[in-house]
Image: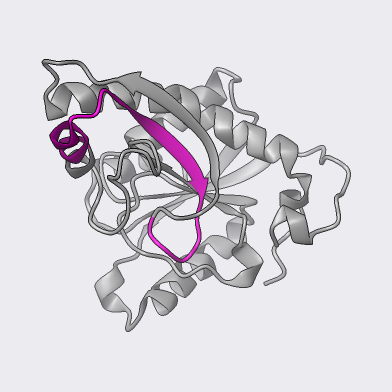
Amino acid sequence: MPAGDHQSIQPPHSRARLAVLLSGSGRTLENLLRAIEEARLDAEIVAVVSSKPGVRGLEIAERAGLPHATIVRREFESDAAFTGAILAWLAPYKPHLIIHAGFLRKVVIPPAWEGRMLNIHPCLIPESGAAGKGFYGDRVHAAVLASGATVSGATVHLLDNEYDEGPILSKVTVPVLPDDTVASLASRVFAAECELYPRAIGDYLRDNPWVFDPPDS
């Protein structure tokens, strides 16, 4: 349950257990593994799920020795059934948080997992006006450039059942330069994400010790 609905407990002695959901290159998974190795994030990644087969993110999980699975949306009759399959597969690994890392499919969050799923979006929410259904990857940066904005960035937020509308946890800003292309802006934003996401996850774990209690179901 979210922190506001849960009685506080003492901070745990074990490390946080993170599951990562991805759909592509796995750059964010790679970054989180690096942050853990460099002791910038006190956690461990215990399992990885991809919504697409054969992506680089699965190769990164394999090299890191992480349990991983591919669960494809079209094999399920609804978003809720798809989410249920993911949560059922993850259950034996007992994650405290589920970290979205370029995961491009909608999930339906059951009450037991409210406040336990985090996402990072590659622009400022809501300032950039480039969030919500259909906005991902280069589409986000193209929209920011088309808007004439002079600032972009990244936003870490909790997942709810709407696209990119969950409570905001942290943001970082980067300049939009006059000669920026989609590729150059994307590169600058991702560099900022690499610092922001591990820090935001660590802050959330520190400020919400209730997540170390197992989900109710």
Q: Is residue 15 visible?
A: no
Residue drawn at 13 percent across, 36 percent down? 146
Residue drawn at 26 percent across, 45 percent down? 24
Residue drawn at 24 percent across, 21 percent down? 176
Which quarter shows the C terminus? bottom right
In this picture, which residue range is highlighted in magenta? 141-163
Q: Quadrant of residue 93?
A: bottom right
Which quarter shows the N terminus? bottom right
Most extreme residue toward the right is 10
Of 142 and 138, the residue lying toward us = 142
In the picture, measured across the screen, residue 176 lies left or right of residue 127, that is left
Q: Quadrant of residue 186?
A: top left
Q: Is residue 117 visible?
A: yes
From the top left corner, tell me how far across and down residue 49 is, in percent.
40, 55
Of 14 and 160, the residue lying toward us = 160
From the top left corner, tell me how far across and down residue 41 is, in percent.
60, 27
From the top left corner, tell me how far across and down residue 61 is, in percent.
39, 41
Count of numbered tags: 0
Magenta includes 207? no
Of 128 and 160, the residue lying toward us = 128
**Which colour style is shown?**
one colour
From the top left corner, tell me how far across and down residue 198 is, in percent.
53, 30
Most extreme residue toward the bottom is 77
Residue drawn at 46 percent across, 66 percent down? 161
